[in-house]
Image (cartoon, rainbow, N blue to C red):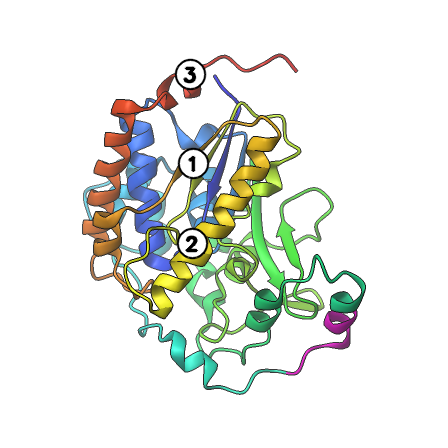
Amino acid sequence: MARVGLVLGAGGIVGQAYHAGVLAALEHDYGWDPRSAEVIIGTSAGSITGSLLRSGVPASELAAWTVRAPLTDEGRLLEEMFGSTHPELEPFEPLELVRRLPNLPHPTMLMHAVRRPRQFRLLTAALSLIAPGEHDIVEQLAALGKKHAWPSGELWINTVRRKDGKQVVFGREGAPYAPLHLAVAASCAVPGYFAPVRIGKHTYVDGGAHSPTSADLLRDRDLDLVIVVSPMSGPAKRPDIYDASRWHSARLAAREVRTLRSGKTPVVVFRPGWAEQEAMGNDFLSADRVDHIVQESFLAAGAYAAHSPLRDMLRAPAMAS
């Protein structure tokens, strides 16, 4: 089988539902098990999905649990960890964030901006300085830490260190150690909504503040294929803050994909079309329509198979190392 890198992007609860639909289609229509990916990169919602895949939960069971369908024995872990209902969170209001006074930047962040201006991301820094939110994401994901330790398969979890706004990828060689549930919680800690997560002597926020996908982390890996599932990307309809976010996410993902392709790595990208976007809505923390999102993303990903060489690419023998 091909050596595949799987990139699971940010997107909140609706993003997890989008992952579930696309991955279930890959499993059902393409005959490929996402759990077999050589390396999985997870950002925010993608870190949860990636952790569950690495714990042995099939994509079909992720989809079944999302739409509250009966689970097989392989999917029981989901109910043991999270119960049978989706979390109910207060609506996310992005405009509320800009009305709150931000924290002052740490001197380390300022030095980073001066010494490496080309590597400094102003938006990432601004997001990391947003005043801490009041919701506790660690409590939401505590079950993840109780059920299994850091998996044996490669799982890279993206976060942003608040002190200097730098991306930290837990699980990657050379990264500091973090308990799995804290790494995932940090990757999901949306600035201004959730409280930052302390790991060791630093605090971290959502890895999506750096990039909703970070697919270019795989540029030095010798892979036959990279599959990018980017829930936050998509075509823009209106000149509002939500579509601006989708446009920005799509722009970053496209740049990262170009980096991979410049190194001759084949890349396939799944992102919401009009139907999936309509199902997802604008509140990415809402669980009201997850069943509709799974259905639309499953159908769209399955339809892609009719005119795509993806199935053959997934079944191609791995190149000799």
Question: Compared to 244, does 38 lie above or below?
Answer: above
Under circle 2, the secondary element is helix
Question: Compared to 3, does 165 lie above or below?
Answer: below
Is there any visible trace of residue 204 in the rendered image?
no
Between the C-alphas of marks 2 and 3, the distance is 27 Å
In the figure, is residue 188 to the left or right of 28?
right
Under circle 1, the secondary element is loop
Question: Is tag 2's residue or tag 1's residue first in the polypeptide sequence?
Answer: 2
Q: Residue at x 70, y 42 (%)?
A: 173
Residues at badges 1 and 3 in contact (C-beta under 8 Å)? Answer: no
Tag 2: residue type? Answer: Ala
Residue with the mark numbered 1: 56
Q: Residue at x 62, y 29 (%)?
A: 263
Tag 3: residue type? Answer: Arg
Percent position of residue 257, x then y:
52, 39
In the figure, is residue 7 to the left or right of 152?
left
Rendered image quadrant of residue 222: top right
Question: Compared to 134, does 296 lie above or below?
Answer: above
Percent position of residue 295, x then y:
20, 43
Question: Is tag 1's residue or tag 3's residue first in the polypeptide sequence?
Answer: 1
Rendered image quadrant of residue 56: top left
Classify the position of the C terminus by image quarter. Answer: top right
- The residue carrying pointer 3 sits among few (fewer than 14), some (14 to 19) or many (20 or more) residues within 10 Å by Cα, namely some
Residue 315 got which mark?
3
Between the C-alphas of marks 1 and 3, the distance is 21 Å
- Image: magenta residue range: 104-111
Tag 1: residue type? Answer: Gly
Residue with the mark numbered 2: 45
Between the C-alphas of marks 2 and 1, the distance is 17 Å
State yes or no: residue 182 in magenta. no
Question: Is tag 2's residue or tag 3's residue first in the polypeptide sequence?
Answer: 2
